[in-house]
Amino acid sequence: MEFSYQIKNPAGEILNGTIDAPDENVAVNLLHSRGYTVVSLEQVKKDLFTADINQLFAKPNTKDMVVFTRQLATLIDADMPLAEGLRTLAKQITKPTMRRIVTEISDAVEGGSALSGALSEYPKLFTPFYVKLVKSGEVSGKLQDSLNYLADYLERTQSINSKIRGALAYPAFIIVAMIIVAIIMVVYVLPQLLVIFKESNIQNLPFTTKMLIAVTDFVNKYLWFLIVIVIAGSIFFWRYIMTTRGKIWLDHFKLRAPIFGGILKNLYIARLAESLATLIKAGISILDAIKITAELVGNRNYQDALLDAEESVRGGGNISDSFSKSPAIPPLVTSMVAIGERTGKLDYMLNHISKFYRSESENDIQNISQLIEPVLVFILGIGVAILVSSILLPIYNLVGAV
């Protein structure tokens, strides 16, 4: 919910603005925690016509986070006061949602809140990993270094995501185009062509032609029923993967998917190793580091492996002993973690693991198009062969007989 407020700051100035909160009590508590006195608070009511289109479609993305983090680090390096730096950044941000959030963070910092505490109020934008590193930078006096590392980390994440999208763009376009062409052919083109064979009473039609006639008749006869089935199936599948059981199934499927399963495994392991190494190096306790990484990794299989490792460490055991029992963790990772634990250089070994698996995943991503393109060409070839044998050859035979 969005609330419009009027508040009085510690200097006695009256300020107006808006704040997002689950309910009115949470909104009041958030404003009080920032040192403000609430004068008035009202829920902003919006309908479809009064809603801010920019806020609906211009939500902050990874690129916005990279720019914000990098610029904030630069301003801190220039010895600009933190609250003033945040206000400066807020003025030049074009996306309304991001600008509002940075403004509220600036107000909170100016009211005496730590930057990490202000960021933690927006968990959808600033993850626990982000907040913990900022807090570590505040405690150690190296906030600029923490922010620069976060910017590098987010840039690497964005780069990998961009490579994946780029590699999938061509195959996705071809597949969608094939589906659209197939629907147009079956619904509009083929019924007019195949009626020739039905009216000519040809007895010895090729098997592929008979199958094409049967499929075309079935689709056109039950077209609306099939549309309803597809829509209902899509809704059911979406609702299913939103459940706990569905998310577990989807996470298992991701790791077993042809071609992409191996790439995703490498990406998850690289993310796990890099996040854990960074948190340990930042001075976060090993138990907190493992727990935060489990929330960040993004796959239930690796989340369970990390939570089991947390329990093992809590009970006096080792991370490597727990990893060795998980089928999701490769033996190479387990061995390198064990060496890191024995030598006291766990963060060093985890960094090497991250670099190795990130390199492997990037190489695989570059090869995706080369792997998928022959498959698409083969499928297109089969489609063309079926059409030729089903339509053109019978037409030539019919013309020849005449």
Image (spheres, helix red, strand yellow):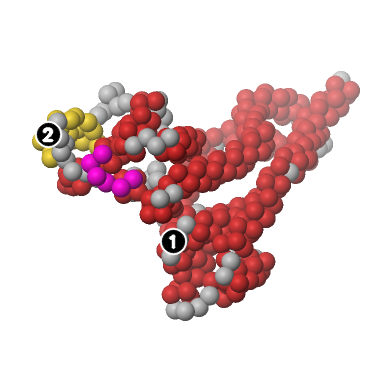
Q: Quadrant of residue 269?
A: bottom right
The kind of residue tagged 2 is Gly
Viewer-side residue, 114 vs 268: 114
Residue 123 to residue 194: above or below? below
Residue 314 to residue 256: above or below? below
The CA span between labels 1 and 2 is: 39 Å
Viewer-side residue, 366 vs 129: 129
Magenta part of the chain: 110-115
Residue 291 makes an appearance in the image: no
Callout 1 crowding tier (Cα within 10 Å): few <14, some 14–19, many ≥20:
some
Q: Residue 103 location, x and y as percent?
A: 30, 33
Q: Residue 254 location, x and y as percent?
A: 58, 54
Q: Residue 332 location, x and y as percent?
A: 67, 66
Viewer-side residue, 283 vs 46: 283
Residue 241 to residue 37: above or below? below
Q: Main secondary structure of the magenta part?
A: loop
Quadrant location of the C terminus in the rendered image: top right
Residue 206 makes an appearance in the image: yes
On the image, numbered disc 1 is attached to which residue? 284
Magenta run includes residue 2 = no
The kind of residue tagged 1 is Ile
| 132 relative to 177 in the view: left or right | left
| 60 relative to 387 in the view: left or right | left
Residue drawn at (71%, 36%) of the image? 212
Residue drawn at (31%, 37%) of the image? 83
| 400 relative to 135 in the view: left or right | right
Residue drawn at (84%, 29%) of the image? 393
On the image, numbered disc 2 is attached to which residue? 12
Residue drawn at (67%, 46%) of the image? 362
Q: Quadrant of residue 380?
A: top right
